Image (spheres, rainbow, N blue to C red):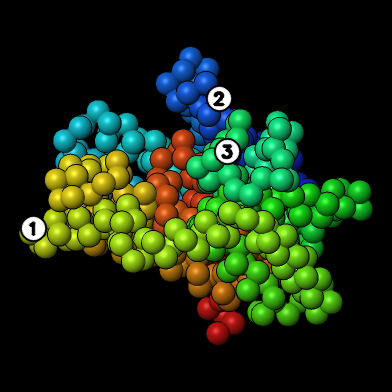
Amino acid sequence: MRVSKNLIKSLLRDPVFILLSLNFFWVIIGYGLGTVFGKNSGPVSIMRQFKTLFLFLSFIHVLMRNGLSFKFLANKFSILLVIIVVGFHSLLSNDLTESGYKAFTFIYPLLYIVFSVNYLSKFGAINNLIGLSMAILVIYAFVPLSYFLIGGSLDTDIIYGRNEGNLFVSNHYGWSSALYITTSLTVLKFYPLKKLYKWCIIGFLPFVFFLLIVSASRSAILSVLMVFAFFLFKNNSIKSSTKILLIIFSFSIFLFIANNENSAIDFLVEKNSRQLETGEEGRIITTRAMLKAFENNPVYWFTGVGMFNYSEMKSNGGTLSSYHNSYWEILFGSGIFVFIAFLNFILIKPLKAFWKRVSDYSLLFFPLMLIPFFEGDLTAGQFLFFPWFTVMIILNLKELHFYSKNNN
């Protein structure tokens, strides 16, 4: 296994990769339209129909190129089990129309990603991660870029709850900034760019890092801290001088923001302290409500309450409209056995491949493992659905696990 500039260039020109990347992009555009016009507006409805049609045509194209083959996946049993059971368990919901639609928008796009990754595996897993990092960097750069192009100011102390922006809200800015920062580390090191483009990526980093902090998105900030910690202390392929510059750069922006009165840093410290003291955080309350439901009905540990079914949560004191946790969606919706199968392909296998083979090339594992724990990303219209499942399924390729077994 090795990085091949020619294979990466061929990957980026492949129609399957281009279509997959465009499906990422349409989700971002849909979110922007939803913020401007409203989630139930005409433009958003048209965009939703367009995305569905585009995904269908993309699926047809990849099936023509790939067939129904899963042969390059190391963990296809767990993936197929989760897909089948999620579809079945959606029938247990009180609102079959809503749960059925959500199950469809999980199963159908996930299968599309599986077949796409299986086909693109011919370019090599590492080359796929580098090419995908380039695509994610360009696509998700649109979000922080829109903030600065449409009136966003560097004088802003915090966006969260005060100035959400014209095209996106604070979490979108935070998540996109986390992805931009993480992918830039891969692209700048491995992707064959001209110096002008490299300096453009580097020049935008201070603005993106600033936006990450003022977004006050805890999941995004925490994921970037994990990326930096791993990059600084475990990655031995980077010069110490580069690491020192990164520390100085990050700390300078942090101090610039922290010195302002009522900064995002102050807000996060106060919010975390208050929620820990009072226990009023919505996700914690919701988790307790579901654990209570499972205590009262132990059979739920094996059957779940039904995918995308929130009636038990609400009747046991939950305060949110959903779990706001992609992992809990599977655990509480389908039970412990399906949850273990889900963790096997979305966390355990990817972690093994990341630790043994991938960490020197891509750190996308961190934000795409962590952020879905705090947000619902199980349907194709969600902000991180496509990058999350695409990266994790790449980390399930046999190539990575075969390599690991022979190098233990």
Circle 1 is placed at which residue position?
Answer: 297
Give above or below for 118 relative to 358: above
Q: Earlier in the sequence, mark 1 or mark 3?
A: 3
The answer to whether residue 14 is left or right of residue 201 is left
Q: Nearer the viewer, residue 150 or 225?
A: 150
Q: Nearer the viewer, residue 377 or 229?
A: 229
How far is mark 2 from mark 1, CA to CA? 43 Å
Give above or below for 173 relative to 261: above
The quarter of the image holding the C terminus is bottom right
- Mark 3 lies on a secondary structure that is loop
Disc number lying in front (2 or 3): 3
- Mark 1 lies on a secondary structure that is loop
Q: Earlier in the sequence, mark 2 or mark 1?
A: 2
The reply to whether callout 2 and callout 1 are in contact (CB within 8 Å) is no
- Mark 2 lies on a secondary structure that is helix
Q: Say what amino acid the circle numbered 3 marks.
A: Asn
Q: Say what amino acid the circle numbered 2 marks.
A: Val
How far is mark 1 from mark 3, CA to CA? 44 Å
Instruction: Tell how many labels.
Output: 3
Q: Residue furthest top?
A: 42
- Label annotation for residue 36: 2
At 58% from the left edge and 76% from the top edge, which residue is drawn?
356
Q: Is residue 195 visible?
A: yes
The answer to whether residue 289 is left or right of residue 234 is left
- Label annotation for residue 163: 3
Q: Nearer the viewer, residue 124 or 364?
A: 364
Horizontal and vertical percent for residue 72? 52, 57
At 37% from the left edge and 53% from the top edge, which residue is drawn?
325
- Number of residues whose C-alpha sits closer than 10 Å to that of mark 2, classed few (under 14), some (14–19) or many (20 or more): some
Horizontal and vertical percent for residue 134? 72, 49
Q: Say what amino acid the circle numbered 1 marks.
A: Asn
Horizontal and vertical percent for residue 73? 49, 58
